[in-house]
Image (spheres, grey):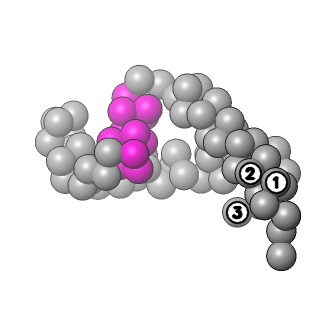
């Protein structure tokens, strides 16, 4: 079991990496990511707002998630 102080530190580090990653995204990709994972909007809603197909949003989300995973892996946080 992890030490709660270590868990808190890990959480802060992870949170910082995610914030940095999100801030590095283009405005469009930032909107898509935040809308889906922070605001919990459905993919259809995001697509309607951007006037694109749902599949376009789904594809971009998959790419963003892959990039985030790569960033986390490179920072030593395997998730």
CB atoms at circles 2 and 1 under 8 Å apart? yes
Toward which corner of the image does residue 50 lie, by quadrant? top left
Closest to the observer, 31 or 62: 31
Q: Residue at x 82, y 54 (%)?
A: 5
- In the displayed structure, 17 sits above or below 53; it is above
Q: Position of residue 19 (x, y in %)?
A: 59, 34
The residue to which callout 2 is attached is 8
Q: Tag 1 or tag 3, which sits nearer the N-term?
A: 1
Could you tell me which secondary element the residue under label 2 belongs to? Answer: helix
Q: Residue at x 18, y 47 (%)?
A: 45
* Label 3 crowd bin: few (<14), some (14–19), many (20+), radius 10 Å: few
The residue to which callout 3 is attached is 79
Q: Which mark is residue 5?
A: 1
Residue 34 visible from this viewpoint: yes
Q: Which residues are magenta?
A: 28-38
* Label 1 crowd bin: few (<14), some (14–19), many (20+), radius 10 Å: few
Residue 77 visible from this viewpoint: no
Q: Residue at x 32, y 45 (%)?
A: 39
Q: In the image, 36: left or right of 4?
A: left
Q: Which mark is residue 66?
A: none
Q: Tag 2 or tag 3, which sits nearer the N-term?
A: 2
Could you tell me which secondary element the residue under label 3 belongs to? Answer: loop
Q: In the image, 16: left or right of 29?
A: right
Q: Residue at x 54, y 33 (%)?
A: 22
Determine the main secondary structure of the stretch shown in magenta: helix
Closest to the observer, 36 or 55: 36
Q: In front of the other: label 3 or label 2?
A: 2
Toward which corner of the image does residue 24 lie, by quadrant? top right
């Amino acid at each position: 079991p992890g030490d709660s102080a270590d868990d808190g530190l890990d959480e802060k580090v992870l949170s910082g990496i995610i914030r940095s990653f999100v801030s590095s995204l283009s405005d469009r990709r930032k909107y898509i990511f935040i809308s889906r994972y922070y605001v919990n909007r459905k993919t259809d809603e995001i697509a309607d707002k951007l006037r694109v197909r749902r599949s376009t949003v789904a594809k971009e989300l998959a790419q963003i998630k892959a990039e985030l995973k790569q960033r986390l892996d490179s920072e030593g946080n395997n998730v």
